[in-house]
Image (cartoon, rainbow, N blue to C red):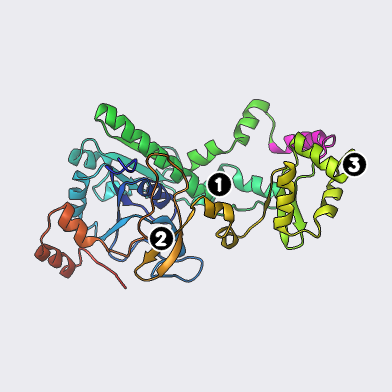
Amino acid sequence: MEQLLEDVRVLDLTHVWYGPWCTLMLAEMGADVIKIEPPWGSLGRLSQRGPMYGGASPTFHHLNLNKKDIAFDMKNEKGKKIFNQLVEKSDVVVTNFVPGTMERLGIGYENLKKIKPDIIYAALSGFGETGPYTKRPSYAMIAESLAGFTRQQGDNVDPDGPPYTMTGAFGDLAPGTMAAMAIIAALRYRDKTGKGQKIDVAQLDTMFAYNVNTTTYFVSGKDEATRRIEQDEFRKNIINIGGIHPVKDGHIFLMGFRAKGMEKLKQVLDVDEVTKEMVLDLIKDMTRQEASDFFADIGLPCSMINYASESTSDPHLLARGMVIDLNHPLLGDYKAVNFPIKFSETPGVVHSPAPLLGEHNELILKEYLGYSDEEIQELYKTGVISQRLT
């Protein structure tokens, strides 16, 4: 075995961030992920925040590496037949629609397990399959807000100010990661028992579990405002030189809590106690790199505060192989982000860019399902399948 999931086939009916991140993790660990799109293309292909590149949004390129693509009309009976045939030959189905959508199409879990009794069906949604919010649509910011992150983010800036949304769709990526972990666990269970199952992954549940402030409240019985007063009193007796600090060419983030590092800093400055003012004066004429290296050398965690565009040339990330070369039919040669986990025996591999719409129609229909050239051409003529290669 060269990759962990090389014998697993996944049908990916997801869009935007949440589901595609989940299936990306599986694809980079070797799963054969088939992205199923409607004839007009999935929502994630369209850019909400700027121009498209190579026929798709940057997000689509980021989240759909290693995947094959087939585009067909699921509401057409012939399209539904293609889907059912693919289910027979697959191990996992992943969706991230509002609960009830797949059932209305006649392809919910109860239908699919009649076709493939040991199928693993991962239903990703904002609020899950049960509960009073189950039919509500959701995005990352909705789950982050309900779970306490958005208010907490604002409090970190100004407790008396407004809430702040989080950057980077954490409310999508964190649940998507949990979903991938759950799918692998279900595959392990199936290996032992021969049984498939349905996995119900809710963004809100996951984000609630990620927020450790819930347990702080449970064990203390005190809300955030009360704890903030206590923390302010506690901190009065603690010297804290950490935080975001300005330097000559931007900012750094310094953690000033390691005892050995603090002692070394006292020696360097030749003082009995270090104050934040001393630190700010020390670094005001340093660059981000100089300040980061200085504190690292004395044993205090510190980093440059980068834009994402700057992190792409970070020497540590490059040494770790996190940036790779790919070739896209429309973009040409470009750089991409590698799988982030290192396995000694079965490394994750990025081998192909995000697919074009319907790029692998013929391959999948011929090699997986045994369709003839004539049958495929008829599907194109009647609009059941589509393709966009330019």
Task: Look at 23% across and 48% down and name the residue there.
Answer: 106
Q: For the residues marked 2 and 3, what is the alpha-carbon distance in whole angstroms?
A: 56 Å
Q: Main secondary structure of the magenta part?
A: helix
Which secondary structure, mark 2?
helix
Give residue 74's position: percent from left, percent from top: 24, 56
Q: Amino acid type of disc 3?
A: Val
Q: Amino acid type of disc 2?
A: Gly
The range drawn in magenta is 224-239
The residue identified by callout 2 is 44
Quick one: label 1, few (<14), some, or many (20+) residues within 10 Å?
many
Whether 341 is drawn above or below 36: the answer is above
Q: Nearer the viewer, residue 284 or 152?
A: 284
Give residue 102's position: percent from left, percent from top: 30, 48
Give residue 71's position: percent from left, percent from top: 26, 61
The residue identified by callout 1 is 144
Quick one: label 3, few (<14), some, or many (20+) residues within 10 Å?
few
Find out whether the residues at labels 1 and 3 contact each other: C-beta distance under 8 Å.
Answer: no
In the picture, the quarter occupied by the N terminus is top left
Task: Look at 19% across and 48% down and name the residue there.
Answer: 84
Using residue 209 as the reference point, say whether residue 360 is left or right of it: left
Image mark for residue 271: 3
